[in-house]
């Protein structure tokens, strides 16, 4: 079940979340809905908007510095997501949408360092 089905926000800014979410799921769903609220666009079915919201939520939840710290030792995406207190989907979104130039430079330097250490 995707995060968009786990929480909703109404026009008054009230967020309702499913009761059975774990900590990481609640954290991701809440950030997703807060970004919707900030953008002034209620939860909808526009895939372009949903992707933009998910990317922004991922950026806010996972700093590139935290991502690099975890990537140094995590043996799997599940382990990294757990340490970052996000879902694996949110982690994948962050990794696939690193757009800010500073983030990209830091991530590239990390990858180069890891390659040099091989």
Image (tube, rainbow, N blue to C red):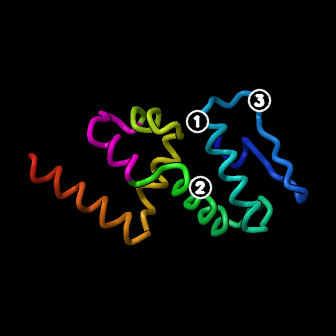
Mark 2 neighbour class, 10 Å CA radius: few under 14, some 14 to 19, many 20 or more: many
Q: Earlier in the sequence, mark 1 or mark 3?
A: 3
Say what secondary structure mark 1 lies in.
helix
The Cα–Cα distance between marks 3 and 2, rounded to whole angstroms, is 21 Å
Of 60 and 97, which appears nearest the observer?
60
The Cα–Cα distance between marks 1 and 3, rounded to whole angstroms, is 13 Å
- How many numbered discs? 3
- Residue that numbered label 2 is attached to: 57
Q: Quadrant of residue 20?
A: top right
Mark 1 vs 2: CB contact within 8 A: no
Q: Which residues are magenta?
A: 65-77
- Within the magenta stretch, is there residue 72? yes
Q: Say above or below: 4 vs 27.
A: below
- Residue that numbered label 1 is attached to: 24
- Residue that numbered label 3 is attached to: 19
Looking at the image, which residue is at 67% across and 45% down? 29
Looking at the image, which residue is at 71% across and 67% down? 46
- Within the magenta stretch, is there residue 32? no
* In this rendering, position of residue 34 left or right of residue 92: right
* Quarter placement of the N terminus: top right
Residue 38 in picture, x, y percent from top left: 73, 64
């Amino acid at each position: 079940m995707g995060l968009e089905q786990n929480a909703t926000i109404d026009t008054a800014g009230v967020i309702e979340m499913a009761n059975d979410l774990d900590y990481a799921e609640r954290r991701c769903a809440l950030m997703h809905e807060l970004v919707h609220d900030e953008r002034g666009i209620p939860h909808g079915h526009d895939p372009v908007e949903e992707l933009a919201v998910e990317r922004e939520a991922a950026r806010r939840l996972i700093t590139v510095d935290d991502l690099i710290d975890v990537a140094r030792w995590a043996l799997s995406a599940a382990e990294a997501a757990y340490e970052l207190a996000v879902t694996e989907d949110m982690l994948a979104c962050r990794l696939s949408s690193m757009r800010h130039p500073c983030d990209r430079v830091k991530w590239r330097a990390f990858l180069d360092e890891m390659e040099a250490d091989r």
